[in-house]
Amino acid sequence: MSQPREKNFFKRHSLKVGDRITNAAGLTLRETIFPLFLVTILYFLWGFAYGLLDTLNKHFQNTLGITRTRSSGLQAAYFGAYPLASLGYANWVLRRYGYRATFIMGLMLYGIGALMMWPAGLKRSFGGFCGATFVIGSGLGTLETAANPYMAVTGPPRYAELRINLAQAIQASGTVVGPVLGSYVFFKETGDSVDSLKTVQWVYLAIAIFVFILAGVFYLAVIPEVTDADMAQQAELTHVGKQEGERSFWKQYRVFHATFAQFCYCGAQVAIAGYFINYVTEVRGDTSSALGAKFLAIAQGCFAVGRFSGAVLMRFIKPRIIFLIYMSGVIAFCCASITQRGNAGLAMLSMTLFFESVCFPTIVALGIRGIGRHTKVPPILARVADAKNSTAFAMVVPAAFFVLAYTYTLAVNFVPSYRDPADKVGESDLGLARHERERGSIDKGSFEKSSTLEKDTV
């Protein structure tokens, strides 16, 4: 535990970690404050970039005269880079060098992509913007590949969902700042003229400078690493046992189901956010793009509130139950937004974002629970919207994807092979201080290997 307890927050040290047991997965709450603070900054960065992207989508339709279908190229470039990062180079770096090296690489890619926005603006090239967005997406995909599991496994397993939802709430705050900035900078004064592309250049130049500085901070920062050996040990100490953590990766069917749910959910979420401004300008009379961007900021505010409230509720109610309630709300309000118009339609779609809030981080946290050493759609909507000339009608597409993701929600609540490993990790007192273990809600013998754990009930 000497490394995690290091008093010096910054020093030059090797990026390569190996697969030794560092005990970082058993850190107390106090010991995780500094490293998780640094990682939480990353959440704000990609929330800000995501919110800015949704505003740029509509902005480029106006300034460059492109269709909704073509503007979806921004989302396609941004999220198309994610699987390349998560399954390719980011995963390779994470496995061989560790979390800190992956964070640094992601920040460098993010900064390079932000700098590429400058020549794209000079040339007024939508293809150039898509290329820059792809590099930005590569960087953010790399950050997310490392940040989500790091947030979930660093510190007491009992609070994994709470930690990741609080961090994602900060990310949601970034998605509020993006549209607000877009409404006042991209759409104001220049009136959607091509001159406003200059503001895009300056905004992304500032982003590049900031993330390069942050990469230097991560290079010097002393943060605990969590290795595969740590996670195998954690799986054993939390009573999940060999039957889960030691299975072959290809037999981790719960992880594959969670991945499928995440794919469907993310596609639907991105589609709604990317065409929110289109939706509100169509269903609500006399609504300009600038006003639509403000409404998007309000909706993203609902998203942020949902994450904070969900994180608080998870302190008292099992995360899988909160997940079930919120995902049910997502489907209900998304379906309602298809037929509603005016302020009612705006309210329905805003409530959809509110209930979306906890879904992504909770799928991540529940999906990797107990797997030990293995821890580590927009174009369709646009095509339907163009064909029917109605973004509201096209909301049937994300609604259908939400229903597919709902299969995992039901499984993790009602199928014992999904539910039991998640609850066992959630009831562990690994990494908790003595006074926290003795509060009375935790069994006296839960820290030792035994057969005295209560059988879970739904």
Image (tube, rainbow, N blue to C red):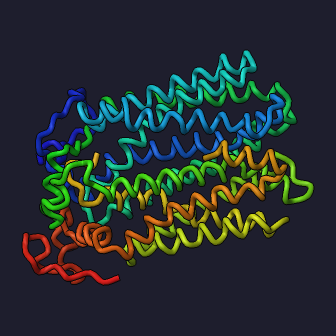
From the viewer's perspective, tell me whether residue 56 is left or right of residue 227.
right
Residue 262 rendering spot, x and y as whole percentages: 47, 54
Q: Which residue is drawn at 51% across and 75% down?
A: 325
Q: Is residue 167 above or below residue 94?
A: below
Residue 81 visible within the image = yes
Query: Which quarter of the figure is the C terminus placed in?
Result: bottom left
Q: Which residue is drawn at 92% across and 55% down?
A: 286
| Rendered image quadrant of residue 240 | bottom left
From the viewer's perspective, tell me whether residue 128 is left or right of residue 98.
right
Q: In this view, does 40 lie above or below 113?
A: below
Q: In this view, does 7 lie above or below 11?
A: below
Residue 27 rendering spot, x and y as whole percentages: 20, 55
Give the mark count: 0
| Rendered image quadrant of residue 129 | top right
Residue 315 visible within the image = no
Q: Residue at x 80, y 36 (%)?
A: 67
Residue 297 rendering spot, x and y as whole percentages: 69, 53
